[in-house]
Each structure stands twice: as structure tokens, then as C-alpha cells.
């Protein structure tokens, strides 16, 4: 092996390690954001949607999706990473409960926002996040419909949460659109010292 191959191999290993560390940091952020409750009307809210949108836009499609998949895998394995765990159950039992569709929606939203972050101008961040939020609610409500009567679906799964989620989306979009290019490059691992 010549010195060029050694350098490329070392850079590839460092890049893979950097990505793995970003994924782990993202899972930790998602977990913390699910556990922190902020007083809000009509129900307290977590910061999970804001963290998810920020990571999707900051990491892009591949790394953002890998992070969300790692988060969901940790939850499926029984780690108490979701809001309300372990009190409301853990693992697949929790994921197959009433909030399971919202978790699937997080993955869809991550792909939508990550794709937009990779391929569209920064001004598309907010519309992409709103589209992602729409995916979260569409999948969440479709799944929740198995657990609650149709006339209560919006009361239980939409109305109490939409105002807070719109605030979280706006916050995440402002953070991403206002972030310097150097910070965005570091988030994605494309900076010179990343």
C-alpha cells in the first residue's frame, strides 16, 4: 500500500467515524428533545419536531435519514428514547401504539426535509418543513384512527399539537436559514476539519 492509499484509507475511516458520531449525537438530541416538556397551550409540548426538522435540514437526506433510523431502531430495541417512555411502555409495543404513525411520519419528514436541504435553495427550508409536518400528521392521524373514534381523531391527534408544531417548525427553519455556511458544513461533515 502506498502513501496515497494510506491517506485515503485514513480519511475514509475518519469520515465514517465522524458520521457515526454525528448520528449518535443526533439520536441523543432527539431523545433529549422528546423528554423536555415546555409549557404551552392547550397541552405541554416537547421539542422533538424542532430537533427532527433541524437535524434533517442540517444533516441532509442521507445522514438525517440514518439518524432517524438509528433513533427509531433504538426505540424499537427498548431504549426509552421516545416521549412518555418508559411510563407508557417501550420498544415495539410503544411504537405500535397510538403514536406509531407519528414516528413513521418523522422518518418521512426527515426524508422530505433532507432532500430539500440537499437539492434546493435555503429559501425552500420552511416550505419543505411544512410539507414534512404535513407528512407527520397524515401518517400519524391515519394510524391513530385505529385507536380512537373518527369524531375524536382531530381532537386527540391534531388540534392540541398543531400550534406548537408550527412554532417548532418556524424555530428550526430560522436556525437553519440563519446558520453560517461553516456551521452547516460542519454539521454535514464537509468542513475542512470535519
Image (tube, rainbow, N blue to C red):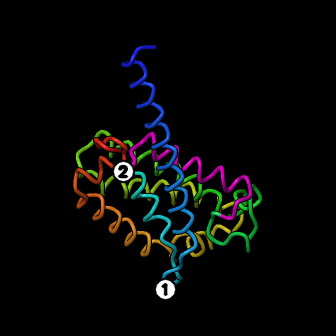
Provide the major secondary structure of the magenta segment. helix
State the image coordinates of residue 38 (x, y, percent, origin top left). 49, 81
The quadrant holding residue 80 is bottom right
| Of the pair 13 and 36, the residue shown nearer to us | 13
| Tag 2 secondary structure | helix
| Tag 1 secondary structure | loop
Quarter of the image with the C terminus is top left
- Taking the spot 76% from the left edge, 67% from the top edge, the residue there is 89
| Of the pair 13 and 97, the residue shown nearer to us | 13
Q: Give the extent of the magenta segment.
A: 57-80
- Vertical order, 25 against 48 (above or below): above
- Taking the spot 40% from the left edge, 48% from the top edge, the residue there is 59
- Vertical order, 152 against 112 (above or below): below
State the image coordinates of residue 122 (x, y, percent, origin top left). 24, 50
> How many numbered marks does the figure carry?
2
Few, some or many C-alpha atoms within 10 Å of disc 2 (few <14, some 14-19, many ≥20)?
some
Name the disc covering residue 164, or none: none
According to the image, label 2 marks what residue? 187
- Vertical order, 122 against 45 (above or below): above
Apparent side of residue 1 relative to residue 75 in the rendered image (left or right): left
According to the image, label 1 marks what residue? 39
| Of the pair 113 and 191, the residue shown nearer to us | 191
Inspect the magenta stretch and tell me whether residue 158 lies in it: no
Inspect the magenta stretch and tell me whether residue 66 lies in it: yes
Amino acid at each position: 500500500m502506498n502513501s496515497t492509499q494510506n491517506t485515503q484509507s485514513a480519511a475514509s475511516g475518519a469520515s465514517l467515524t465522524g458520521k457515526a458520531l454525528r448520528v449518535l449525537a443526533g439520536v441523543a438530541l432527539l431523545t433529549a428533545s422528546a423528554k423536555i416538556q415546555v409549557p404551552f397551550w392547550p397541552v405541554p409540548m416537547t421539542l422533538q419536531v424542532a430537533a427532527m426538522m433541524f437535524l434533517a435540514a442540517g444533516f441532509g437526506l442521507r445522514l438525517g435519514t440514518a439518524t432517524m433510523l438509528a433513533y427509531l431502531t433504538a426505540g424499537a430495541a427498548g431504549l426509552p428514547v421516545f416521549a412518555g417512555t418508559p411510563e407508557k411502555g417501550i420498544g415495539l409495543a410503544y411504537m405500535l401504539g397510538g403514536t406509531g404513525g407519528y414516528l413513521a411520519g418523522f422518518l418521512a419528514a426527515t426524508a422530505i426535509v433532507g432532500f430539500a436541504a440537499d437539492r434546493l435553495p435555503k429559501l425552500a427550508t420552511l416550505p419543505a418543513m411544512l410539507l414534512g409536518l404535513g407528512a407527520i400528521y397524515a401518517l400519524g392521524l391515519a394510524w391513530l384512527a385505529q385507536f380512537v373514534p373518527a369524531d375524536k381523531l382531530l381532537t386527540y391527534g391534531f388540534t392540541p399539537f398543531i400550534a406548537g408544531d408550527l412554532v417548532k417548525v418556524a424555530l428550526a427553519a430560522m436556525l437553519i436559514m440563519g446558520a453560517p455556511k461553516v456551521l452547516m458544513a460542519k454539521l454535514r461533515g464537509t468542513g475542512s476539519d470535519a
